[in-house]
Amino acid sequence: MTKTPDTTTHHSALVPGSTPARGPVAFVGLGVMGLPMARNLAAAGIDLRVHDASPQACDRARIHGLKVSGALAQALEGASTVITMLPDTPHVRQVVRGPDGVLARCTQGTVVVDMSTISPLATQELAAELADRQLALVDAPVSGGVRAAVSGTLSIMAGGAPDALARVRPVLETMGSATYVGPAGSGQVVKACNQVAVALTIQAACEAFTLGSRFGVQPQVLREALLGGAASSWVLEHLAPQMIDGDDSAGFRIALQVKDLRIAVDAAAGQGMPLPGASGALQLYLEAMAHGQQADGNQALARVYERIADVRIATP
């Protein structure tokens, strides 16, 4: 039977008197999101060691003055908190289960904070394995994109034991605002919900611009009008200008959007329920992938609509 996180029986109140985690923090994953997050931790005076499997990512971290550990085992040694910000489920499993990973290297009481976006069921499995070794997992995926990662204003959706979250909350608050959403796996469920809502909002904006463009309404004018009414959204405010300018540069890549939508659709299928909107958006993003757009930002869904509707959204 598929295990479903129960987000209804837990509340945001944390265990009184919980002691914040003390000791070095290991941060694993220095990509477009991870690097600015790690920089905020270091700027807050946290004893931080960082690591990435990519030598180029490690070099970028050194340029920014971060203390880089060349090997994962070196980063994990003596760490009280381990933060992962990695592309997908297999990468997180490797950091936890690998021969030089958390289970092999970390001592009792270490809290693992996974800020990646991965499978909720895989998160539950990892939480159980860590608990068997007296280690804790807080799944804490984030929303807000690169802008929020840089400014330290990420929305953090945290699942796990309340006392574990209480111990790492001071660390999380250097990167954004954490909301406790339930037991292990719940953070990933909420992130999946977030990604469904964002993808469908992007799709809605693209369809609106497609319809308006077909009838000769300038996209800039249409955006301004929509921002003043009930259709206003974060997507219209932040991503629509890029759609209109033809700027497909990545804040959040289409390849990651596909991964996240698959997580949501697969999780729903495991519960025997359809997600018709998310499934449709996934197909459109797969069309973008088929046209070589995997490295483009998710706002580049507008290019898909330009192709299928034979209209021009982007203006010179």
Image (tube, rainbow, N blue to C red):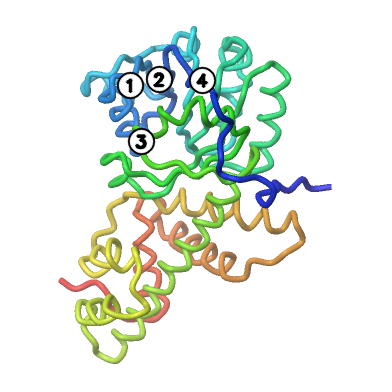
Residue drawn 66% across the image and 54% down it? 266
Q: What numbered label is drawn on residue 51?
A: 2
Measured Cα–Cα span from mark 4 to mark 2: 26 Å
Which of discs 4 and 2 lies nearer the camera? The answer is 4
Q: Are marks 1 and 3 in contact (CB under 8 Å)?
A: no
Secondary element type, mark 3? loop
Amino acid beneath label 3: Met
Q: Are marks 4 and 2 in contact (CB under 8 Å)?
A: no
Measured Cα–Cα span from mark 3 to mark 4: 20 Å
Q: Position of residue 207 (x, y in %)?
A: 40, 78
Amino acid beneath label 4: Thr
Residue drawn 27% across the image and 79% down it? 228
Q: Which residue is mark 1?
A: 58
Measured Cα–Cα span from mark 1 to mark 4: 32 Å
Q: Are marks 1 and 2 in contact (CB under 8 Å)?
A: yes
Amino acid beneath label 2: His
Amino acid beneath label 1: Cys
Tell whether 187 sits left or right of 212. right
Q: Which residue is mark 3?
A: 175
Q: Position of residue 306 (x, y in %)?
A: 35, 75
